[in-house]
Image: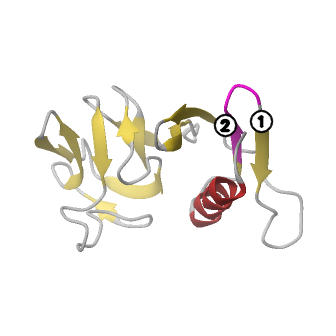
């Protein structure tokens, strides 16, 4: 069973993210959360988010896969390796990039930590960051989209 404290944490994550929906399941219970539209109109089509909650010794842990289709003129910067995604060089630093920022080929956009090695991920072409598709401090899979670039 998903307790209230954990549910409140997931609600906070949803509110602070660009996700529109969040679905949780621990094998016996399922919870579906959806943000209301800011202007009271119908919410846009939900971004598919697959979230599995695993009960461990420290309580439930969420593993999220965020899949957001890029528009026709957008490309994605994908993870070249499996590891932990970091948006900034240190916890006290500003993120390397943010939505609306222009990047040039070779600019560092994030770090992926794999086997205690910090791997700087670079933009593959010039463009503007239109979305950050990974959450700071979370595990990313090989070829998982990290950023949308227009």
Mark 1 = which residue? 30
Q: Is residue 33 left or right of residue 13?
A: right
Q: Using the image, determine if residue 81 lies above or below residue 18.
A: above
Q: Is residue 122 left or right of residue 51?
A: left
Q: Secondary structure at mark 2?
A: loop
Q: Residue 6: percent from the left, percent from the top? A: 63, 54
Q: Is residue 59 left or right of residue 46?
A: left
Q: Give, as a single range, the part of the protein colored magenta.
A: 22-28
Q: Magenta stretch: residue 113 in it? A: no
**Is residue 76 at least partly visible in the picture?**
no
Counting labels gives: 2
- Please rate how many residues cluster around mark 2, counting C-alpha atoms within 10 Å: few if below 14, some from 14 to 19, many from 20: some
Mark 2 = which residue? 48
**Is residue 132 at least partly visible in the picture?**
yes
Q: Secondary structure at mark 1?
A: strand
Which of the 4 image quarters holds residue 97? bottom left
Q: Nearer the viewer, residue 86 or 2?
A: 2
Q: Measure the C-alpha gap from mark 1 to mark 2.
A: 16 Å
Q: Is residue 136 left or right of residue 70?
A: left
Q: Magenta stretch: residue 27 in it? A: yes
- Please rate how many residues cluster around mark 1, counting C-alpha atoms within 10 Å: few if below 14, some from 14 to 19, many from 20: few
């Amino acid at each position: 069973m998903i307790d209230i404290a954990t549910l409140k944490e997931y609600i906070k994550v949803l509110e602070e993210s660009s996700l529109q929906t969040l679905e949780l399941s621990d094998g016996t219970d399922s919870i579906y959360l959806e943000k209301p539209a800011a202007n009271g109109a119908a919410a846009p089509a939900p971004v598919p988010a697959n979230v599995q909650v695993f009960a461990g010794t420290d309580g439930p842990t969420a593993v999220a896969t965020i899949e957001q289709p890029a528009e026709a003129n957008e490309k994605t910067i994908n993870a070249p390796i499996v590891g932990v995604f970091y948006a900034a060089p240190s916890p006290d630093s500003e993120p390397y990039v943010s939505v609306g920022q222009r990047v040039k080929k070779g600019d560092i956009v994030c770090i992926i930590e794999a086997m205690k090695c910090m791997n700087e991920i670079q933009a593959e072409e010039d463009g503007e960051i239109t979305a950050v598709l990974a959450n700071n401090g979370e595990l990313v899979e090989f070829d998982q989209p990290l950023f949308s670039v227009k």
